[in-house]
Image (spheres, rainbow, N blue to C red):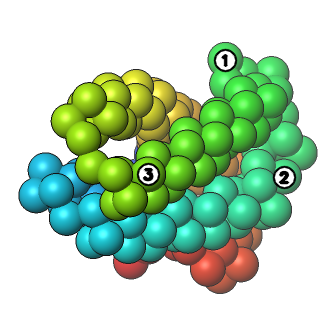
Amino acid sequence: MHVLVMADSELTRRMMAAHDTYAQRFFAHQQALLDRDFPRAGRELGAYREALLAHMRDEEAYVLKHYEALGGDATDAPLRLFLGEHKNLRTFVDEFVDRVESLAANANDHALLELFDREATYKNLMLHHDLRERNMLYPFLAARLSAKEQQLLLAACASAGD
């Protein structure tokens, strides 16, 4: 028997808390860019990238498998949408790593402004991705998984925030 739960379930809260933590890390990266501290910007971006990749691995290995099995593809946000966004997010972040390394070697205003423009596009994609997960993916799962199943899912996800 599955118990229906509200969208503000522990599953939703903890998985989305991870998103909030990553957003803070990306902000720290952008602050370092503003300071023209490219080594620090690279470190912050590297930490952001590693945390984001770990989170996406958890979602792909555990979360999205439940979503698909429970009928998520019959919604307005099918599995391929989440996987495609993950691929795009990875591509963007890898590009940013390369651009920051280039800036560290040869800083110039034009390249820095281009990076900020690309990061604005990325942040827009991330905003839409975050909203889909916050308003669709995790509430969908919370409404269909028992409390015990949700706890097991959270335990499997090393990236789940507190």
Q: Quadrant of the C terminus?
A: bottom left
Of the numbered discs 1 and 2, the one sitting upstream in the chain is 2
Return the mark for residue 76. 1
Rendered position, 88 above or below 62: above
Residue 92 visible within the image: yes
Q: Residue at x 27, y 49 (%)?
A: 107
Depth order, front residue of 64/12:
64
Amino acid type, residue under disc 1 in the picture: Asp
User: Which residue is denoted by mark 2 in the rendering?
Assistant: 65
Q: Residue at x 38, y 65 (%)?
A: 42
Left or right: residue 8 versus residue 60 is left
Question: Label 3 crowding class (10 Å Cα cut-off): few <14, some 14-19, many 20+?
Answer: some
Return the mark for residue 102. 3
Residue mark closest to the camera, 3 vs 2:
3
Depth order, front residue of 18/124:
124
Per the model, the C-alpha gap separating discs 1 and 2 is 17 Å
Amino acid type, residue under disc 3 in the picture: Ser
Residue 60 x/y as whole percent: 77, 55
Residue 104 x/y as whole percent: 34, 60
Return the mark for residue 126. none
Of the numbered discs 1 and 3, the one sitting upstream in the chain is 1
Of the numbered discs 3 and 2, the one sitting upstream in the chain is 2
Question: Label 2 crowding class (10 Å Cα cut-off): few <14, some 14-19, many 20+?
Answer: few
Residue 75 x/y as whole percent: 72, 22
Residue 48 x/y as whole percent: 44, 65
Classify residue 27 by image quadrant.
bottom left
Amino acid type, residue under disc 2 in the picture: Lys
Label 2 SS: helix
